[in-house]
Image: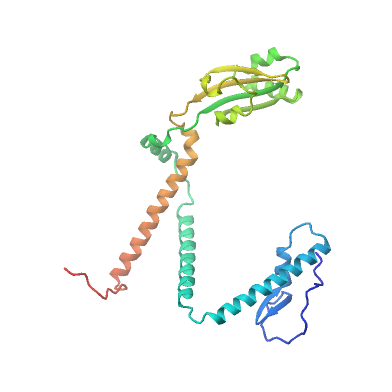
């Protein structure tokens, strides 16, 4: 990285009493604010030529100096800083609270939600899992129409056993076919439809569990084996909803935990007379 010289230089060198950061190389200074070479290098985009690096650095330095001057001028021209100080303090406080809460939750919930909790939530809240799009499990094959042994593949892709899957995978590699096994995970019908040629009617209208379908265009044959199908409006399968339920439970537990932490702190402070009520409530 070439940043040894910049086209932007100061007119005069003035000795400074600023305490510089040890191990860093000062490049420009404005009334005690210092920009270091290492900070500029961190901002440089990758892949720039030496000339472009110098142009970027010059522009960065100039913008930095302008920002510092404007900020320092703003301080001089806004003598009443009470509102700003209050906003800064509120922001600082929120950062401390957020970081403390993050650390508490990280310590408390390092262990995972149990499968029993997930299943219980799913069974108790099935109304939350009504599908707004259909889901399908199965096998998809896209095979060049001139491939050999199509009859064998048509037979294998309906059998749904490990030996057949192995043969299909070998065939796909040899014949440049596209093969997607999704018996263990759900795909939306919309995702699946994007893999197929243009259809006369929506795929969803003709799908059902345990069916085999074949489509073709001028170049390929498309084979689809549907092991499971859940239509829009049905109940989302547990194994598809599991990750979302896990997140909901974690969030719910976090909220409950943080509420208890705050209540315990309040009760302890009240018991130790660390809370002073200057105006008692009227009876």
Name the residue nearer the viewer: 70 or 157. Answer: 70
In this picture, is 244 found above or below 61? above
Q: Position of residue 227 (x, y in %)?
A: 54, 22
Residue that protrudes farthest toward the left in the picture: 283
Q: Position of residue 95 (x, y in %)?
A: 49, 65
Based on the displayed image, in which of its 4 quarters is residue 264 positioned?
bottom left
Q: Is residue 27 left or right of residue 282?
A: right
| Residue 184 showing in the rendered view | no
Residue at horizontal 70 percent and vertical 86 percent from the top: 16
Q: What quarter of the picture does the N terminus occupy?
A: bottom right
Q: Position of residue 32 (x, y in %)?
A: 65, 81
| Residue 109 showing in the rendered view | yes
Q: Is residue 226 left or right of residue 8?
A: left
Residue at horizontal 68 percent and vertical 86 percent from the top: 17
In this picture, is 56 found above or below 204? below
The colour scheme of the drawn protein is rainbow
Residue that protrudes farthest toward the top in the picture: 151
Q: What quarter of the picture does the C terminus occupy?
A: bottom left
Q: Position of residue 63 (x, y in %)?
A: 69, 70
Name the residue nearer the viewer: 49 or 158. Answer: 49
In this picture, is 160 found above or below 129? above
Residue at horizontal 73 percent and vertical 76 percent from the top: 26
Q: Is residue 64 left or right of residue 203?
A: right
Number of numbered markers: 0
Residue at horizontal 62 percent and vertical 22 percent from the top: 162
In this picture, is 119 found above or below 174? below
Name the residue nearer the viewer: 215 or 100. Answer: 215
Q: Is residue 53 left or right of residue 264?
A: right
Based on the displayed image, in which of its 4 quarters is residue 140 positioned?
top right
Residue that protrudes farthest toward the front in the picture: 77
């Amino acid at each position: 990285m070439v940043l040894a010289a910049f086209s932007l230089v100061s007119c005069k060198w003035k000795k400074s009493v600023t305490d510089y950061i040890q191990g860093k190389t000062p490049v420009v200074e404005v009334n005690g604010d210092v920009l270091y070479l290492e900070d500029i290098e961190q901002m440089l985009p990758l892949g720039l030529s030496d000339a472009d690096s110098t142009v970027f650095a010059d522009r960065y330095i100039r913008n930095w100096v302008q920002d510092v001057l404007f900020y320092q001028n703003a301080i001089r021209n806004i003598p009443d800083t009470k509102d700003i100080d209050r906003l800064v303090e509120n922001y600082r406080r929120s950062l401390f609270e957020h970081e403390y809460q993050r650390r508490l939750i990280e310590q408390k919930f390092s262990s995972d939600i149990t499968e029993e909790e997930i299943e219980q939530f799913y069974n108790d809240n099935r109304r939350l899992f009504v599908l707004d799009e259909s889901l399908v499990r199965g096998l998809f094959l896209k095979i060049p129409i001139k491939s050999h042994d199509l009859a064998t593949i048509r037979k294998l892709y309906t059998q749904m056993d490990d030996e057949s899957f192995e043969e299909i995978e070998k065939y796909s590699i040899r014949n440049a076919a596209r093969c997607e096994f999704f018996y263990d995970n759900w795909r939306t019908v919309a995702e699946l439809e994007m893999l197929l040629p243009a259809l006369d009617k929506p795929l969803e209208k003709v799908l059902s569990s345990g069916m085999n379908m074949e489509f073709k265009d001028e170049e390929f044959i498309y084979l689809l084996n549907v092991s499971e199908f859940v239509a829009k409006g049905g109940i989302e399968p547990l194994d598809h909803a599991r990750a979302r339920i896990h997140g909901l439970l974690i969030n719910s537990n976090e909220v409950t935990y943080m509420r208890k932490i705050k209540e315990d702190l309040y009760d302890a402070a009240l018991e130790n007379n660390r809370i002073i009520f200057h105006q008692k409530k009227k009876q």
